[in-house]
Structure formats: C-alpha cells, structure tokens
Amino acid sequence: MKLHQLRYLAAVVQNGMNITAASKKLHTSQPGVSKQLKLLEDELGFPIFERDGRNLVSVTPAGQEVVDRALRILEEVSNIRRLSSDLKDDRTGSLSIGTTHTQARYVLPEVVQKFRAAYPEIDLHLHQGTSEQIADLAKLDRIDFAIATGSGELFPGLVLLPCYRWSRRIVVPRGHPLAQEREIRLSTLARFPLVTYTFSFTGRSSLPALFEAAGLKLNVALTASDADVIKTYVRLGLGVGIVASMAFDPRDDADLVVLPADHLFTPHVTWIGFRRGRRLRGYMYEFLKAFAPHLTRRLVDQGIRAGTPEELAQVVGDLQLPER
C-alpha cells in the first residue's frame, strides 16, 4: 500500500466517483488512477467500489472504512507538512476562504487589509458563493476556511466556531409607504412583493417558514445571493428589500431608508469553519482572531479537541458574541 494510492482513492471519492475529474485534479492520467485503485483493491482482498462495467457507482461498506481511514492519514500527512512549513517560515504560505457575497463585500475587507499588512507574503484566495457552493468547496478540500451563516448541516466535517450575530433589515426607497410606519407588522410586510436573499436548496429557509407559521402568503418578487443586487432592484421599485444589517452603508445607500426588523426576524449567527483534525498554521490563527477577536488560539484549540458537536457547544456556549 502506497501513499499515492490513498491520494488517488481520496480524489476519486471527493470528485463523485469520476476518475476523469480526479485524474485532472491529480495532474495524472485516467488509466494510471484506475490501475492504482485496482492494485490497492487486489492488495486489500476486497472491492472498495461498486462498479457498473468500467464506471464506479458507489463505495462498498468495507470500502467506506478504507476511505475514512485514508482521509485521516492524508490529513495527518498534510499536518506534518504544515508543521514543517511553520518551523521553517511561518510568514509564507497560502490561505483560501470560501464565503458569501455579504461577508466578502461588507465584513472581510477591513479584516483582509489588516491581515495582508501583517502577512504580505501569504497568498490569499477568496471564493464567493452560496452556502451549498461553499460546502462543495469544503468537501473537495479546496478551501482552508468556510465563512457562512446557518446551514451547519452542510458542513458535517468542519469545526464551526461562532463569530458574530446579525439581524435582517428592511430597505425601501425614500417616500415608500413603509417608511412612514412606526413599527412594521408581518401582515403589513406581506402586502408588498419582497426582494431578498436566495433561499437554501437544502432544509427549510427561515423567511418562508416565518410567513407560513403566521398564516400569511410570502410574495417574492426576486431572490439573489448578492445584497448589492437586492438593493439595486429595490431602487428600481421591484419590491421591499430584506438584507443583512451589515449590508447597509449609510453613505452608499443614502437614497434608501433602512427600517428595523428585530421584532419580526430572529437574529442569525455567522460562523467560521475548518476541517476537523487539521493542524492550523500560525497565520491561520491570526486570521481567525482578526475576524472574530474572541477566537483566541486557546479557544480554537479547545474547539479542535472537541470530539462531538455537544462538546464543541460546551466550549463556545458561554461566548458573548458581538453584534453587527
């Protein structure tokens, strides 16, 4: 059994049993990957994959145990390399972050600016997308950190640490009827078409559930993953906007009126996550602290050592999260 065989195995599984995609990621040939997988199965004495002709269909029960152990071995190999890199030079390397538009546009700029000033030799890569797209990047091990809100069920292999709380806000053009309301009721909001964030494709989105629980019809004119797009269509009169509190800039959005909605919508928690069992490099701890100052190295290490979600909840349960 060779280490490169385990790498091939992991790449095939992470690419949905697609040997062609795995070979491209590995920068090797498709026949070479197939041959090494067959040699590994011959050595083990049992099949790792269910096959339909030459196509891989699924992982066998015994094969899944091999895959799980292979991933842990490869993670530890990566950890050894990270340890070596830190000991040689802890100020060079790379950091890839998967996050939503709202975080990238309104929260991360100041953090990234400070981090780059402290670590100018670090290659920083920012990938924007929906929670589902970020989860895919995490599954393929293409990112070091994932930053999102909710949707924790999409990231079962990550340690998720809470960063801050935020609430929804209602935005309308100046002169809009809602701008005259002292306190907007959900029944009043239901009379207008809404422009808001794209609903999750997995699980129940909180906004439709809220209207449904109140026996009200949700009238959606448009959904988008980009808060700036939402505000653009609000300006065009397409509907009433609902955006994250940090996505309203008094200078850039002076033509809009922002209305409080804490009495309508429950607050949300944004988290940052990384692969369970991964050794973080020194500059990664510094980025975590820059993004969420309460995430000290000691607390992060406690989160890493937490073996179950319940243990992790005990570690972070008493944190007083900042509001944005």
Image: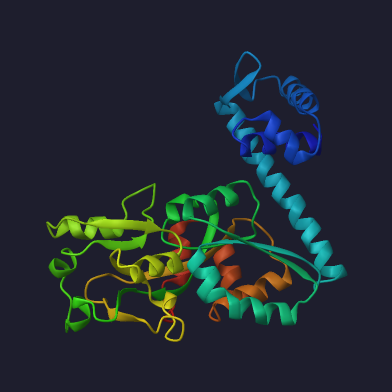
Q: How many marks?
A: 0
Give x and y (percent) for residue 108: 57, 74
Question: Which image quadrant for residue 219?
Answer: bottom left
Above or below, comparing residue 249 to residue 274 in the picture: below
54 vs 317, left or right, is right
Give x and y (percent) for residue 242: 32, 68
Residue most extreme to the top: 53
95 vs 170, left or right, is right
Q: Is residue 269 in view from this perspective? A: yes
Front-lying residue, 29 or 90: 29
Q: Is residue 296 in view from this perspective? A: no
Question: Which image quadrant for residue 146?
Answer: bottom right
What residue do we see at 79% from left, 57% from top?
Answer: 80
Front-lying residue, 122 or 160: 122
Q: Quadrant of the C terminus?
A: bottom left
Give x and y (percent) for residue 168: 33, 72
Front-lying residue, 28 or 222: 222
What residue do we see at 72% from left, 67% from top?
Answer: 281
